[in-house]
Amino acid sequence: MKWKMLIVLVAVFSMALFLILFVLGFGLVQKPSVSFSVKGKFSGVARQPWFEPLSNRRAEIYVGNEKIFSLLEDFWDGPIFIYPFEDGKRFLCDYDDDVAMLDFIVDFSGMPTSALNSSPWPTDDRLRADLARMATNIVYDTRGVVRLPNHTELQEITAYLTSTTPKPNNAGYFNFLNFWTKESLLLDLASNRQSCWP
């Protein structure tokens, strides 16, 4: 009888210890804020509240004190890479979704979308439509336009990723996402991309 009670106590203690370590570990690997800069100039910050339900998390992007957009995220899905363009009015987001790697621009420049998308990416019409539709489903609280990048923007980001910078700006809050390499990001942005999941 004592052995059974001891086994139950050890099992309960082990489960409690596991839960405590899981919660502490989750808090330690989470990045509550990530600053963005381009060419040494501060351009914004991504923030995430420490205590927010897992099912309703958002990465909130601020410039100064103004929240300019939010990205939906959960335990498995979320932003991997956010690139602020030098004008401070466009942000490229590389986002890990359940069924696709999404790459899109949140644009506050006020330029007509038709002019910005004069060189469409990717070239496959159906893939472009799918990526654009999925991107608009994860961006919240914005007055910016959510659109796909054009070839000029892709060239700038590719040049940044292939430069000698040690590591791209990263908005992977859980750190499980930090295994994304520059090479993986470059595949997502490839000019000949043919699939939702490159």
Image: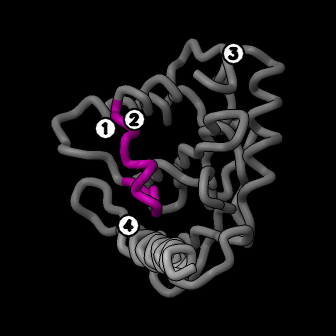
Q: What amino acid is labelled 2 in the image?
A: Glu
The magenta stretch is 170-182
Q: Secondary structure at mark 4?
A: helix
Q: Quadrant of residue 37?
A: bottom left
- Gap between marks 1 and 3 measured at Cα: 22 Å
Can you say whether 77 is above or below 45 in the image?
above
Given this view, does label 2 or label 4 mark the residue nearer the observer? 4
Classed neighbour count for the residue bearing mark 2: other residues with Cα under 10 Å, few (<14), some (14–19), many (≥20): few
Q: What amino acid is labelled 1 in the image?
A: Tyr
Numbered circle sitting on residue 13 = none
Asked if the residue under mark 4 is in contact with the one under mark 1, i.e. CB atoms within 8 Å, the reply is no
Q: Quadrant of residue 35?
A: bottom left
Numbered circle sitting on residue 156 = 2
Asked if the residue under mark 2 is in contact with the one under mark 3, i.e. CB atoms within 8 Å, the reply is no
- Gap between marks 3 and 4 measured at Cα: 38 Å
Identify the mark nearer the N-term, 2 or 4.
4
Given this view, does label 2 or label 1 mark the residue nearer the observer? 1
Identify the mark nearer the N-term, 3 or 2.
3
Residue assigned mark 4: 29
- Gap between marks 3 and 2 measured at Cα: 18 Å
Q: Position of residue 150 (x, y in %)?
A: 59, 31
Q: Position of residue 132 (x, y in %)?
A: 77, 38
Q: Quadrant of residue 34?
A: bottom left
Q: Nearer the viewer, residue 192 or 13?
A: 13
Residue assigned mark 1: 160
Q: Is residue 42 left or right of residue 113?
A: left
Q: Secondary structure at mark 1?
A: helix
